[in-house]
Image (cartoon, grey):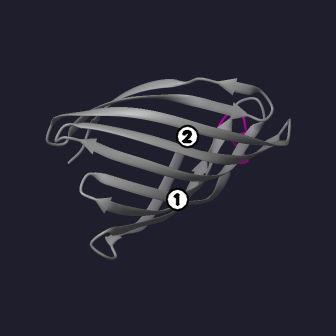
Amino acid sequence: MQWAAWAGVMGRVTPAIVVNGVIGYTQIRSASIGVSSPLDGITVVAEVTWHARRGTALSAGYDKGLEDSFFTGTMHWHYVFARWEQMLGSRLGVGLEGGTRFELYKGAVSYPDTVTKTEASISYHLADHVDVLVAGGFWNRATAGWDAPVRGEVTFSW
């Protein structure tokens, strides 16, 4: 069982710069961490995006969060990233993202870990507020080596 509350602001500072800031609180109760001792903490998202020209966006950001981890109990992370997104025409978009996530596992087994992530994506605008995205990349986990995850999404937004 998990509940979370967030509040934030997203706004255009100049015609080319958009700032996004969200702060929240999350509480998780899980059988793997014990129902009597919930995991809770502050979550944060901070991102600055520069629209260099029409259809091009460069972003840098920070994400802090926590989650239940089956084998250890809990995991807290700090993720620092950079992203480039480019529209190729009116419907096709491409993107690249890279970042490092600093993780701290606590519980039956406690240890820090570092994940370096690179990801490329391609998206297609089916209609207003409907996108299809396919992404893939590489993750290098300091304790386990390389992995190559691939994901697909259909996004509806209003």
- Residue with the most extreme left position: 127
Residue in the foreground of this view, choosing between 7 and 82: 82
> Where's residue 23, x and y in %?
51, 65
Query: Number of callouts in the render?
Result: 2
> Where's residue 45, x and y in %?
51, 60
Q: Which quadrant of the figure has residue 43?
A: bottom right
Q: In the rendered structure, which segment of residues is drawn in magenta? A: 30-37
| Disc 1, SS | strand
> Where's residue 31, x and y in %?
68, 33
Labels 1 and 2: the sequence-earlier one: 2
Residue in the foreground of this view, choosing between 93 and 42: 93
For residue 33: magenta? yes
Pointer 2: residues within 10 angstroms few (<14), some, or many (20+)? few
- Residue drawn at 45 percent across, 25 percent down: 151
> Where's residue 6, x and y in %?
45, 61
Looking at the image, residue 62 sits to the left or right of residue 100; the answer is: left
Camera-nearest label, 1 or 2: 1
| Disc 2, SS | loop
- Residue with the most extreme bottom position: 13
- Residue drawn at 42 percent across, 49 percent down: 84
For residue 111: magenta? no
Q: Which mark is residue 1?
A: 2
Q: In 3D space, how far apart are the residues under numbered discs 1 and 2 (Cα atoms)?
A: 28 Å
Looking at the image, residue 129 sits to the left or right of residue 70; the answer is: left
Above or below: residue 77 compared with residue 93? below
Pointer 1: residues within 10 angstroms few (<14), some, or many (20+)? some
Q: State the predominant SS element of the stretch in magenta.
A: loop
For the N terminus, which image quadrant? top right
- Residue drawn at 36 percent across, 55 percent down: 57
Q: Circle 1 is placed at which residue position?
A: 61
